[in-house]
Amino acid sequence: METCSALEKKGFEVTYLPVYEEGIVKVEDLKSAIKEETILITIMHANNEIGTIQPIAEIGKIAKENNIKFHSDAVQSVGKIPVDVNELNVDLLSISSHKIYGPKGVGALYIRKRTRLEPILYGGGQEKDLSPGTENVAGIVGLGEACRLAKEELDENIPYITNLRNKLIDGILNSVEKSYINGDIEKRLPGNVNFRFTGIEGESLVLMLDAKGIDGSTGSACSSKKLTASHVLKAIGLEDVDSHGSLRLTIGPENTEEEVNTVIKEIPPIVEKLRSMSSIWEKEESLLKNNTKRCDID
Ligand SMILES: *Cc1c(COP(=O)(O)O)cnc(C)c1O
């Protein structure tokens, strides 16, 4: 998004597509947004906050039919679900090493043949002049090994993590009233859960969970220091109060059922405690009571 807004400042015209309540781009919207002068479509494969998976293969087909280059940010999806540049019909695909347990500071861009790029740095001739500077060999080898391991373990990890994730969702939704899931429940990364609890501050919840040894986050990690509402949660139509009551938890292959059970046990009393101190929750409850009264009279 920031790259697009930088391009706008240079005079490019950018169309931003909506994602609706499910957090997913509609292919029809994309079709009707294509103009004669459209040169590039870029849509992330999976979202880092709510884990929703976009219809990349379908969008790629449309891009190809219209002779438009297609890029996807697959940083969140690589290593978590199958990613095949041919099946996804992408011309460009970016990945990052540290999101799949590789070393920090290294990533990769897949470039399909006949996709012409301009360098963003100039000087050395490395990487066909596209990324001048001496390569970080240790980092690159680490990324390769992380990819190899991720692929090797994928078939085993997907059902294992999905099962834990679903247990976590059921456990929380069944024990905390007015708790919800942000984003589509099916078209989502196996390990991603993004809860929404009415009437609480997610930041307080994160701190209290941290004290119990449970790591979660409200917005994406890079922006969580700012207390502005997450643009992702805004894009799926949440009001500021609701987006502040959201909590992202992610599950990886090393997490256990026991840990999930601990989370299910720890969250409800914390939410209850936070609600007992919350003016938003008080309002919510009196609204509920008034509604009941009205029904009684009716
Ligand atoms: C983390 C992340 C990035 C940034 O990758 P870095 O290697 O950490 O700079 C980009 N896109 C998505 C979807 C991410 O989750």
Image: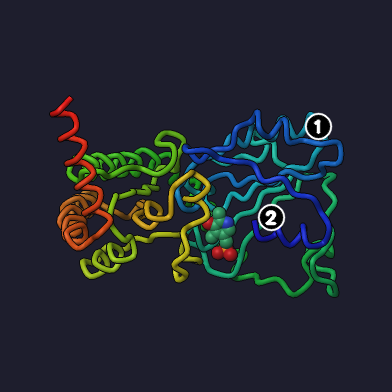
Query: Compared to 240, does 138 lie above or below?
Result: below
Query: Compared to 98, does 151 lie above or below?
Result: above
Tell me, for residue 57, which label it has, or none: none
State the residue position of label 1.
Answer: 66
Q: Position of residue 165 (x, y in %)?
A: 32, 44
State the residue position of label 2.
Answer: 109
Which residue is nearer to you in this view: 210 or 200? 200
As drawn, is 76 to the left or to the right of 246?
Answer: right
Amino acid tagged 1? Asn
Residue at the far front: name it. Answer: 297
Would residue 44 be visible to someone looking at this image?
yes
- Residue at image position (85%, 69%) is 125
Q: Is mark 2 within 8 Å of ligand 1?
A: no
- Residue at image position (80%, 39%) is 68
Q: Residues within 10 Å of mark 1 (few under 14, many from 20)?
A: some
As drawn, is 135 to the left or to the right of 48?
Answer: right
Query: Compared to 182, does 145 lie above or below?
Result: below
Q: Position of residue 16 (x, y in %)?
A: 67, 46
Quadrant for the C terminus in the image: top left
- Residue at image position (64%, 45%) is 43
Would residue 248 be visible to someone looking at this image?
no
Ligand 1 is found in the corner quadrant, namely: bottom right
Residue mark closest to the camera, 1 vs 2:
1
Q: Residues within 10 Å of mark 2 (few under 14, many from 20)?
A: some
Element assignment for label 1: loop
Q: Position of residue 44 (x, y in %)?
A: 60, 47
Quarter of the rendering containing residue 185: top left
